[in-house]
Image (cartoon, rainbow, N blue to C red):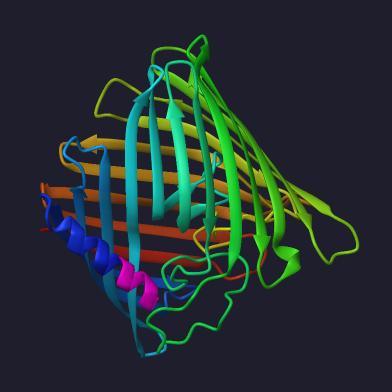
Amino acid sequence: MKRIIAIALCVCTVAAAFSVDGGALLRGYGEFSGTDFNKKLFRFDGSGWMRTPLTKNGNLVLSAEACYGMEYGTDGQIAHTADLSLFKLGYAAKIGGGNLNVSAGRFSVSDVSGIVFNQPADGVAAAYRNYLLSVTAAANYTGLINSRNTTMIPVPAEPIENTAVYALSVPLVSGMASVSFPELFANQTLSVGIQGYCGIRKIDYQRIYATLSVNGPLSANLFYTASATGEMLFGDTSSPYAGLYGSAELAYYPPVLAAKIALRGESASKNFDTITKYSVSVSDDPCTNITKFGVSGSLNIKAILVLANAHALFTTSSMDYRGFQLDGGTRWQIVSDVQLGASAGYLFPSGEQDGYGKISINALIAL
């Protein structure tokens, strides 16, 4: 962590000779959850960001974002968190009728599926785009990011205590590559991606994922997306085993109030795991051995966005009914720099199990 801060200070000193664009965000969040809404969480954090070109033509840019937060939970203790969520050198150039972008440092990384790996990491990435295709490649390391701000499925390398402002995350080395063909035929887009993860301390964190995704319009206001991801895990198990995840959505956009109505389903097999935590229910069930389908809708009324969802949940391996979930939320852009939001959801389980609910409210101010 000390090395990261030292490097950041050195680069920022050099950047001081150039024009700097920056700002700050203040966020407040409150949540009540549980079977009787007896779990509470209150969080306040502030973040600052900056962006500065390091060359006269602006093709080399330094971007950074740091944050500090305080959290108060059901245990009655206050936890402090400090993080450097972004520290990136970005290079852009036009090559062969397309655009090349290269990034190095700490930045957000996402795979083609958007669920396996979607978080900050340290490393390098390159992307080339032209009118025919888009190609990306990245190599990253997760062992230096703050696990208090990014939840990964494997158990953290060190126990997280309320006294730990910065707790190192699971040390994984990852590599990923993808290619996308925009508007390959009839305005349809095809994307293919592959990624691998290797544990530094535990051999059973060796995983390989492959994703195939298609999306596009079916008519002027009707669109679809479909994606399938396969996983292979190698390690100290008796034999490698595989997992599978699939999702599909059919969305209609009425020509009023920027509305959207969608049918969506997703299913993960018993052996499927993500790297970044991906919750599929109000009770934060992980994306493992679960099938979910239902309907969702959204609309904009001037500066207010309203969302609503209804889904049924099943256990994939047996297709036993697990419950029904209702959730929704709203976001009000009061002025350009002030935003309020609220959300609520409840899971009605099958059988005699207790339900689980969650209510939250948040506020954001941009400075």
Relative height, residue 191 to residue 309 (above, below): above
Question: Quadrant of the rendered structure where residue 22 is?
Answer: bottom left
Residue at horizontal 56%, vertical 41%? 113
Residue at horizontal 18%, vertical 64%? 13
In terms of depth relative to the viewer, which is nearer, 22 or 350?
22
Instruction: Report the quarter where the C terminus lies.
Output: bottom left
Q: Is residue 289 visible?
A: no
Magenta region, residue range: 1-7
Question: Quadrant of the rendered structure where residue 305 is?
Answer: top left
Residue at horizontal 49%, vertical 38%? 295
Give coordinates of residue 44: x percent, y percent. 25, 73
Q: In the picture provided, is 247 more to the left or to the right than 364?
A: right
Q: Is residue 138 visible?
A: yes
Give coordinates of residue 215: x percent, y percent. 52, 24
In terms of depth relative to the viewer, which is nearer, 36 or 245?
245
* Residue farthest toward the top in the current orientation of the protein: 186
Instruction: Report the quarter where the N terminus lies.
Output: bottom left
Give coordinates of residue 281: x percent, y percent. 53, 57
The kind of secondary structure the magenta stretch mainly shows is helix
Instruction: Please say whether residue 184 is one of the residues in the magenta stretch.
Output: no
Q: How many marks?
A: 0
Give coordinates of residue 168: x percent, y percent. 49, 75
